[in-house]
Image: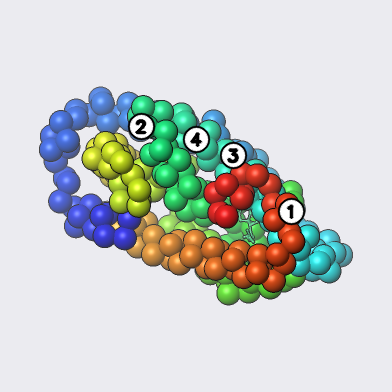
Amino acid sequence: LDELPVHYSLGLIEDQRLLDLNGTEIEYVSQNIIRSHLGTCQFTSDELSKMVWNAHSQEEVCSLQSKPCEMMWQLCAIHVSNAIQYVVEFAKRLDGFMELCQNDQIVLLKAGCLEVLLIRMTRAFNPSNNTVLFEGKFGGIQMFRSLGCDDLLFAIFDLGQALCRLSLSDEEIALFTAAVLMSPDRPRLTESKKVQKLQDRIFLALQKEIQKRHCSEDLLTKMISKLPLMKTICNLHADKLEFFRILHPDTAHIFPPLYKEVFC
Ligand code: MHQ
């Protein structure tokens, strides 16, 4: 993901014939991905825009802040793994994903699900007051104080701000998350050529979708430019988790199985 998308941002794949696809086929790729996203995104955009002004009260924030560190880690892990279940369902509905070997399905999901979640977070993020959806209501970074991971949380909120500035549509979020999931350069992939082909099709569909809205031509470049920050966040999350497990060696059982499977 670090180096690969560069040739897209340079616009080298302008000609869809390079991929042997006609306009109808690209439309078909788009429709499958957008439908998969809408069917697995947990909240519709309408629901989210209604919830956005429903903020945690001062008391609710204080009660989150006074939770012991372990309990707050557990709570976050529960919400994250719950959201990951929807990402797994999204992947399964993408054309081509279930035809990959099981090893590659697992590699792609393990490596990509947090990045997908971070992109999906844009939908549940309110940049005007820097709040995110957590436990059914919106709240700021201070909600997470007891985690003791301020740098991780600042990075996540920075990304939220940066992605919101792109004002992505649900269609663009669908195609972008699918492209990130289908990254052919994940370590230990056995059929990366197959994954590469699937990702090429998705980027083509994304390019078309962006043209449709005739917004800034370099939107794709801007989207791709957020990938390094996402990778940083994934690494930070892994470091924080490792540190947490060293400090609390007896707490392996507090995390949901899916969270452990993906991150431990
Ligand atoms: C999804 C819905 C959703 C669900 C959960 C893991 C850790 C130690 C810290 C939300 C991260 C804390 C997450 C719960 C925090 C940044 C995490 C905890 C879109 C994404 C969203 C809103 C997640 C966003 C990130 C949250 C708030 O459809």
Q: Residue at x 23, y 52 (%)?
A: 8
Secondary structure beneath disc 4? helix
Give the quadrant of the N terminus: bottom left
Mark pair 2, 1: CA separation = 33 Å
In the picture of the structure, the residue carrying the numbered disc 1 is 254
Please report contact status of discs 4 and 1: CB closer than 8 Å, yes or no.
no
Q: Which residue is mark 4?
A: 90
Regarding mark 1 in the picture, which secondary structure is present there? helix
First reached walking from the N terminus: tag 4 or tag 1: 4
Please provide percent x and percent y for residue 247. 69, 71
Q: Which mark is residue 85?
A: 3
The reply, left or right, for residue 232 in relation to residue 196 is right
Q: Are marks 3 and 2 in contact (CB under 8 Å)?
A: no
- At x 25%, y 55%, the residue is 4
Q: Residue 127: x, y in percent? A: 57, 62
* Left or right, residue 228 beside residue 74: left
Counting from the top left corner in percent of width and height, residue 148 is at 68, 73
Between marks 3 and 4 in the image, the one whose residue lies nearer the viewer: 3
* Lower position in the chain sequence, tag 3 or tag 2: 3
Is disc 4 surrounded by few (<14), some (14 to 19) or many (20+) residues within 10 Å?
many
Q: Secondary structure at mark 3?
A: helix
Q: Quadrant of ligand 1?
A: bottom right
Q: CA distance from mark 4 to mark 1?
A: 26 Å
- Residue 130: which quarter of the image? bottom right
Q: Which residue is mark 2?
A: 100
Mark closer to the observer (3, 2)? 2
* N-terminal-most mark, 3 or 4: 3
- Disc 3 to disc 4, C-alpha distance: 9 Å
Say what amino acid the circle numbered 1 marks.
Answer: Ile
- Given residues 160 and 79, the one toward you in this image is 79
Give the label, 3 or 1, closer to the camera: 1
